[in-house]
Image (spheres, rainbow, N blue to C red):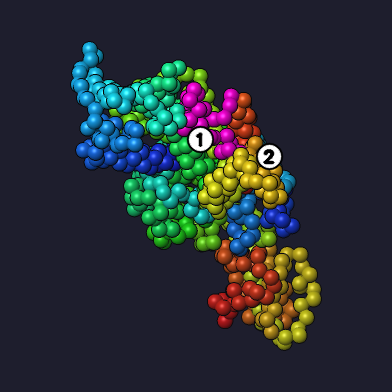
Amino acid sequence: MSTIQISHLRKAYGGSAAVDDLSLEIPAGSVFGLLGPNGAGKTTTFKCMLGLARSDGGAILYDGKPLVPATFERIAYVPERSVLYDWMTVAEHVEMIRRAFASFVPARALELLAQFNVDPRKRARALSKGMRTAVMVAIAFARNADVLILDEPTSGLDPVNQRHVLSLIINEAARGCSVVFSSHQIGQVERAAEQIAILDHGRCVLQGLVDDLKADRKIVEGILPDSSFSLNGIVSDPRIARVDRVERIVRLLVLRDADDIAAKLSAAGAAGVRTVDLNLEDIFLYAVSPADATADVVAAENLP
Amino acid sequence: MTYVEWLRVGRCLKWTAIALVACVALVLYARFGFANLITHEPTYLEIHGMSFKQFERTAQTTHSVLADGTKRTVFSNVRQGVSVTVDDRGYWGQRVTVVDRDPTQTFRARNFSFGDLNVRRTILPNGTLIFSIDSSRPEHLAYYFAAAAFVALIVATVLGAPFARENEGHLEIALTKPVRRETLGLATMATDVAGMAAAFVLTIVFFTIGHTIFEAPRYVFDAGDALVLAGGFLAAVGWYALLCAATASMRRAYGVILGLSWPVAALISIFASSNFGASPVARVLHAIATPIAWVLPFSYLHFDAAFDVSAETHAAGAGLSSLQDLPILLALVLIYGAVAIVTWRRVEA
């Protein structure tokens, strides 16, 4: 069981901030999803967590202690790209990890490799992208680690194996392992993660329990009498996080009390007012996209 | 901790062994493929303007067997005052002694020594020349050490970028092991040095085998040999450490450094050790190369002394110039090793 605390983490490359004042707390035995568009700072965050990149500020603590070499005995990491040695066989990779980590269970790794249909006698250069990912995943999950850091662990895998990896993640969390993972497959994150943080341009723009975020956030939408209709008095409500207008259609991202806001909008003269639930993908897009860019996200499927 | 490096070293040693086996196979072919060309008579001698075959026809030949089993053949031409004694010990070597009372016309060769071959020219007070070609003398191990140092230098170049190889997309594995980076770096370099030592030993073993194919090897080992052993190996390790330091922060293209390292180092060594005349360009090149050569382990290796034509000294100078080079080489090993570790320590994934 291990709790990870990241406080005010900063990392810049050249003059550009890759991670800017990021603070997260990942409870022990939980699955934490890190979301963000390309270049948001997810991989850099992982690298800073592992000491692979030196942070410019802030602190990262594992159970209240900074990262030291011995901590790696408890951390397993799957990078976003293949880091396997092309000239080595899969079995040699397993042997390499066995020699480096006392808690590694080679039999478990071989069992997982068999489940992913990877032949341990093959050299890494002969493996497809998905198989390389599978090797790294198998090795990481056989580590019996307290912390699993997975950077797009399903990249290149077929849907069956993606589902298998999600099951493994959930099983590891059930065992008490803290799992932090990133993925562009938001549906997977929604399925596996209890908590998420959404990064954009190195900053955390949203974080919380997935269920709470989904329960709190609603879209209230309606059709205004005309395109110049004023929404003064409604949009200033602090419960409204965002307003998108396209011609007569108005869409309000509401943080709480959606029914109350819907009633207000209706009373103001809007027709066809309705409240729409959001899934994690909608929440993600609202969090990282500029106003109007998401105008058709909900409307396309939900407007009458 | 350094399993990957051991695998790399193992692959390198495998290819080293294959190359050495190929060399031994060539030696075997040379030994038995040209066996009929090997003669027990010194047909390479020229006596008073005659080939040995011509001389043999004018000489009286006697055969005998000495107490130790040596087959002695004496070719004697009293009229010319020349006698040639061939003591043939078969697999244990041969000694040819020429006694010439009128040496004005022959044997202008200088004293020469290489390996177990010793050529000596002695003029007695009465003017008689005694010329001997002895291939049965014990051989200094310095020859083997110099050759082994050369092979270790090649292996050092092949293994010379361990950190750059990790930087090239494997840091996520290398640097997430439960060990300090400095320890990992040191262990990695130690592994490679062990590989170079193995290549060193391997070369000596294969050279011994190659030698044994032709004749029985007999060796001597003295302080000069020890100097070549220590200096040759240290120079190879220093060269390896220099390459490590030069490539520790690289992520790609380190092969260019490794590939160009030999010609560049050879040019520096040549310009530093040779004077190409009084032209300004030559002097400038010499002036630039000399200080660089001081910090270039490659330039501390010399193989020219193996061919000893100075009559009295032997081959112990092969591979190293002097005893005071040893501490310099050791210092270079430590400095370049430390630079490599410190540089790699700062690399980010």
Query: The residue under label 2 is which amino acid type?
Result: Pro
Which badge, 1 or 2, comes first in the chain's sequence?
2
Q: Chain of mark 1?
A: B
Q: x, y (%) of residue A136? A: 45, 49
- Which residue sits furthest top? B67
Query: The residue under label 1 is which amino acid type?
Result: Asp
Q: Work out whether residue B240 or residue A120 is closer to the camera in this orientation and state it.
A: B240
**Residue at position x 69%, y 55% from top?**
A13
Which residue carries the number 2 mark? B291
Q: Chain of mark 2?
A: B
**Residue at position x 58%, y 38% from top?**
B299
**Residue at position x 36%, y 38% from top?**
B20
Q: x, y (%) of residue B267? A: 58, 46
Residue A3 visible in this rendered orientation of the protein: no
Q: Is residue B317 magenta?
A: yes
Q: Main secondary structure of the magenta part?
A: loop
Please tell me in which quadrant of the rendered image residue B22 appears.
Answer: top left
Q: CA distance from mark 1 to mark 2?
A: 22 Å
Q: Secondary structure at mark 2?
A: helix
User: Which region of the structure is painted magenta?
Assistant: B296-323
Q: Work out whether residue B134 or residue A126 is closer to the camera in this orientation and state it.
A: B134
Q: x, y (%) of residue A276? A: 60, 71
Residue B129 visible in this rendered orientation of the protein: yes
